[in-house]
Amino acid sequence: MDMAKQKIIYELIQKDLHQLENSESEFSHKIKEIQEVEDIDSFKDPIFNIQIHYYQQLLSIISNIVIKIGSPNNSISYAQVIENLILEGYLSFDAQLTPYREKDNIMPIDLSGFLGVDIIRKEGCCRHFASIHNAIFHKLHLFNDIFFCYKWNTNELFKPPIHKDPKFFTADHASNLIEYNGQYYIHDSYNQQYFYFINCFTAIQAIQYEPKDIQRFLYYVPVIDKLFNNKSYREILKQMKRFEESSLKPHMDSSELNDIINKTNDRFYNSTKLLHDFREEALPYMKKIISP
């Protein structure tokens, strides 16, 4: 993305939600401008279109292995299989993955929605993990949404004053919103963690690992959600209401979550033949994606 677009993005995400309500037409107009440029660039680039064609075919192959290894109709189990496939290099063309972190705090925007291709090219940060995770779930015809958030650990000095300041923070992290037994959970495949809501903005780590005195929180950032998905102000409010309702419903306890994760991991790491056959089928598409 060029600097002009970056500037528009940066200016928009500085506005709080109330300002956005009053400037809905301005916001929509800016987003439309960016989308039109992205669409034109994409259609003009035949190589890009070929890559996306092979990427969609690859996603179908990936969704098949997720179903074969994961527990039937279990979004958490499927999410765990996807996490393992990414981190173990099965979704990268040379069977290696180099996770990287952003060097600045402004999230580059790619409105084409195909950030998962970078995973195939063997590198990526949280938003690339979240993008391919989201794309696979859509192939499975299961609910999934990219959850844009600000992350904070209890051992850090700074805590976002979400309830003191009406302005919302620029997201510095992306995870995935999944649904299990009618309840929302957040799967952070980049950091291998699961979360549940404790209010309409905040989610807390579902399983407490060592050291016990450190807890991770994720803060929902509605402005970024609006930016990526061009949601209306009313849609954002409805989403926040759903998160609030989720926080009031019973969640599974950590032992049940651990049981799903452990059983899925056992099946994954004992599926040597399935994973080998998957790689053999997927590799030609991966090579076409990186060298169309």
Image (tube, rainbow, N blue to C red):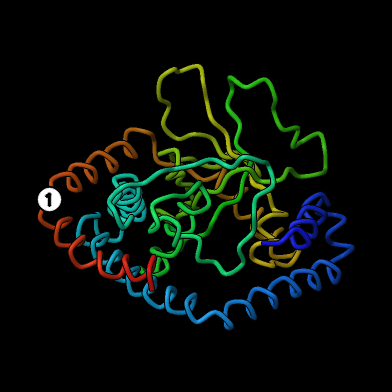
At horizontal 67% and vertical 60% (from top left) the residue drawn is 238
Point out residue 125 in the picture as x, y percentages from the top left corner.
Answer: 50, 47
Q: Residue furthest front?
A: 291
Disc 1 crowd rating (10 Å Cα; few below 14, some 14-19, many 20+) is few
Q: Amino acid at mark 1?
A: Thr
For residue 76, side relative to residue 161 (left or right): left
At horizontal 36% and vertical 55% (from top left) the residue drawn is 75
At horizontal 76% and vertical 32% (from top left) the residue drawn is 161
Number of numbered callouts drawn: 1
Q: Nearer the viewer, residue 181 or 185?
A: 185
Quarter of the picture holding the N terminus: bottom right
At horizontal 76% and vertical 36% (from top left) the residue drawn is 163
Q: Nearer the viewer, residue 46 or 171?
A: 46
Q: Which residue is mark 1?
A: 272
Point out residue 113 in the picture as x, y percentages from the top left corner.
Answer: 54, 66
For residue 129, side relative to residue 244 (left or right): left
Quarter of the picture holding the C terminus: bottom left
For residue 19, side relative to residue 189 (left or right): right
For residue 249, side relative to residue 157 (left or right): left
The secondary element bearing badge 1 is classed as: helix
Quarter of image, res 103: top right
Point out residue 218 in the picture as x, y percentages from the top left corner.
Answer: 58, 39
Quarter of image, res 212: top left
Q: Residue furthest left?
A: 273
